[in-house]
């Protein structure tokens, strides 16, 4: 098959040696082309304009909008891999993408994208390995930021509001069944009617003899969360009934749970309130 640059690999040693091989191959090519001495004349303003217009002012890697004054002309085929400085070999890129694309070979870029997409999903669904790697990654990010000339202050979750939570239809293993825009809108409407953003309650009153249903994920494992609630005098149930007091939702909460709250409260005279697990966590910890 054409374009199959990445082989199927099923053990770690082969994977590591594949990466090393690609790396060595790239270095060799770099040395080869160095001896050929490709002339590096910068593009003229006119040439840069031609390059810029190839993508209508968008970074050819990520698609972000770039500025004609300071975009980077990315070598489609890197100099070090034998690419030349003709206009045909350039596409406009943002500085981030040009920096990360480096002079990797096509195989390496494909691996980097494949790994990146895989890992991003692992982190997003908070899988155990995903979180472990994310932790290490963030430690490096903190060091990296500190080396910047002007270190930025970190982005923090502004609050425990509903707006940062994402609903799903369900989950099969790690695969998320996405909700449609319309379905999300219905859930938001129900949350608007029965959600409480700020509990402002006394810890004892909040839990004592109250029945909770949890849906979605939070920073604590589900069973630990349940134990904490129970230790404070509350009960945790799996299904929503008229007797439930709170539906506590975390990220990737189930749409159907929220719909059930709407149904029970509207049709069966229920009084279930929806809160975020983040808000609840302020009281259990
Ligand atoms: Zn970009």
Image: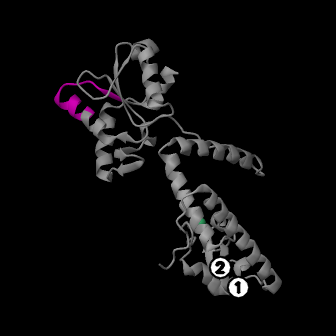
Looking at the image, which residue is at 31% across and 41% down? 255
**Which mark is first along the chain, 1 or 2?**
2
Viewer-side residue, 229 vs 32: 32
Residue 220 coordinates in the image, percent (x, y): 50, 30
Q: Can residue 66 be seen in this view?
A: no
Residue 227 vs 83, above or below: the answer is above
Estimate how packed mark 2 is, as few (under 14), some (14 to 19) or many (20 or more) residues with alpha carbons within 10 Å.
some
Circle 2 residue: 77
Region in magenta:
261-274
Dot 1 alpha-carbon crowd within 10 angstroms: few under 14, some 14 to 19, many 20 or more? some
Side (left or right) of 79 relative to 220? right
Above or below for 209 versus 114: above
- Residue located at (66% from left, 62% from top): 17
Quadrant of the image occupied by residue 114: bottom right
Give the residue at mark 1: 84
Q: Is mark 2 on a helix, strand or loop?
A: loop
Q: In which quarter of the image is ligand 1?
A: bottom right
């Amino acid at each position: 098959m054409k374009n199959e640059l990445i082989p199927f690999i099923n053990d770690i040693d082969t994977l590591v040696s594949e990466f090393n091989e690609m790396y060595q191959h790239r270095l060799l090519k770099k040395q080869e082309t160095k001896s050929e001495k490709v002339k590096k004349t910068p593009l003229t303003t006119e040439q840069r304009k031609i390059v810029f217009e190839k993508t209508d002012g968008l970074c050819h890697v990520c698609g972000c909008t770039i500025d004609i004054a300071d975009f980077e002309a990315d070598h489609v085929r890197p100099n070090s891999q034998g690419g030349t400085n003709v206009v045909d070999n350039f596409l406009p890129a943002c500085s981030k993408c040009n920096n990360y694309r480096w002079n990797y070979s096509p195989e390496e870029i494909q691996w980097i994208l494949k790994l990146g997409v895989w890992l991003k999903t692992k982190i997003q669904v908070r899988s155990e390995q995903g979180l472990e790697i994310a932790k290490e990654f963030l430690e490096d990010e903190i060091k990296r930021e500190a080396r910047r000339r002007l270190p930025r202050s970190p982005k923090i979750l502004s609050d425990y509001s509903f707006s940062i939570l994402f609903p799903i239809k369900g989950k099969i293993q790690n695969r998320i069944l996405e909700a449609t825009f319309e379905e999300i809108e219905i859930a938001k409407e129900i949350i608007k009617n029965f959600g409480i953003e700020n509990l402002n309650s006394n810890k004892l009153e909040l839990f004592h003899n109250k029945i909770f249903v949890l849906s979605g994920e939070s920073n604590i494992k589900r069973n630990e969360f349940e134990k904490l609630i129970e230790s404070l005098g509350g009960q945790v149930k799996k299904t929503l009934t008229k007797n439930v007091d709170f539906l506590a939702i975390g990220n990737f909460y189930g749409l159907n749970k929220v719909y059930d709250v709407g149904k029970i409260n509207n049709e069966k005279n229920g009084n279930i309130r929806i809160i975020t697990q983040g808000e609840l966590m302020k009281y259990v910890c």
